[in-house]
Amino acid sequence: MQPVAFLAGAPSGPQVAPSTAQTALASHVAPAPAAPMSQVSASATFAMAVGVGAAACFANSRRRSARAGRRTQPESRVTRLAYPLGGAANLRLMLDTSDLKEWEKFLPLGFFHGITSNPVLMQRAGWPVSLETVKTLYAKAFTYPGIQEILFQTWGDDAKAMYERALEIRAIDPVRIGVKIPLTTEGMKAARMLRQDDEEAGTHTNICMTACYSAGQGFAAQGLDATYISPYLGRMNDQGMDGIKEISELYHTCGGREGRTQVLVASLRNAAQMVELARAGLDAFTFSPKVAEELVNLTRTNEAAAWFERAGKESRGEAV
């Protein structure tokens, strides 16, 4: 990669020499000999994949920043997001559980952007599926460092019921709460009702269209101006689909990094799947505590840390 590549898209005019920082970045991402996959942990490979993807998108950061500005500036919207899209990287990791014990285990680590929930996860964690549960979980979520949003799924037998419940959920915090809505016909009607309400009130609801199983559903999500669309990778694979391929196509259907609807991948079974999708450009994932454990608790990393600590104590003549 030549440093001048970072100037692609710059205004026409006299040639500008690449800055020291740009030259250093180009040098940093230059191809290096690849280590055997067996010697690289899933979490380390995931980090590298996202890092390289961020550097590759450096030249487009001007357009992404402009897009972020458009999302927050119009008077017809309170905000597109409380944390606008933009910059060279847009990695968002969310913890997919309503179990407070799991929250306490992983959220203090500080690298999660948000939390996702749905009626099944509430029930599994012993919570009644109710507005009171939503309020309780919301109040707890933002006591953890780094948490920017929490997504709750609406419920109801028809579009009107889902819409009314969504209004109640949104009212708790219109900026930091997102509303998940299934990509059913009734769900799409409910989403359209929310958007009509937004247009009339000059607000903007952060909507996540969920239970996606097809790249084509991305068109519906974009038509509804959804903030997120959430495909179920593991369940796609369970049904004999090539989930990675389908989600990669969904990502491009939604415009990739330039799109207004971000693909938030759900139903991940392991960290290796995140690595593979990150290589395809995806950068938003919600996953279970089991997958989170793979990212944070690696035996070799723990052994290396213990080795460093032991050396320090020995150098000071302390008991090991």
Image: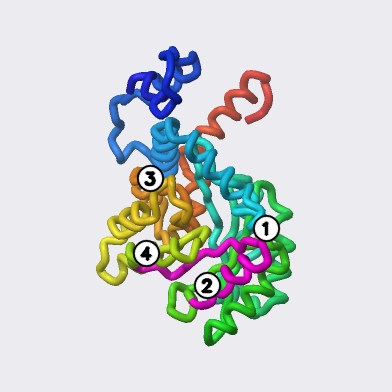
Residue 69 is marked as: none
Q: Where on the picture, by quarter, is residue 34? A: top left
Crowding at dot 2, Cα within 10 Å, few <14 / some 14-19 / many 20+, comes out as some
Q: Nearer the viewer, mark 4 or mark 3?
A: 3
Let me know if residue 176 appears in the view.
Answer: yes
Of the residues shown, which amino acid type is indicated by label 2? Arg
Q: Nearer the viewer, mark 2 or mark 1?
A: 2
Compute the Cα span from label 1 to label 4.
30 Å
Q: Which residues are magenta?
A: 189-213
- The secondary structure type at the circle numbered 2 is helix
Q: Is residue 286 left or right of residue 243?
A: right
Of the residues shown, which amino acid type is indicated by label 1? Val
Give the mark nearer the N terminus: 2 vs 1: 1
Q: Is residue 305 magenta?
A: no
Residue in view at x 48 percent, y 35 percent? 61
Give the mark nearer the N terminus: 1 vs 3: 1
Write down the residue under mark 4: 234
Write down the residue under mark 1: 175
Give the mark nearer the N terminus: 2 vs 3: 2
Of the residues shown, which amino acid type is indicated by label 3? Gly
Write down the residue under mark 3: 281
Q: Is residue 191 magenta?
A: yes
Give the mark nearer the N terminus: 4 vs 3: 4
Question: For this rendering, which residue is in front, 291 or 22?
Answer: 22
Residue 269 horizontal/vertical position (percent)? 40, 60
Of the residues shown, which amino acid type is indicated by label 4? Gly
Q: Nearer the viewer, mark 1 or mark 4?
A: 1
Compute the Cα span from label 4 to label 3.
19 Å
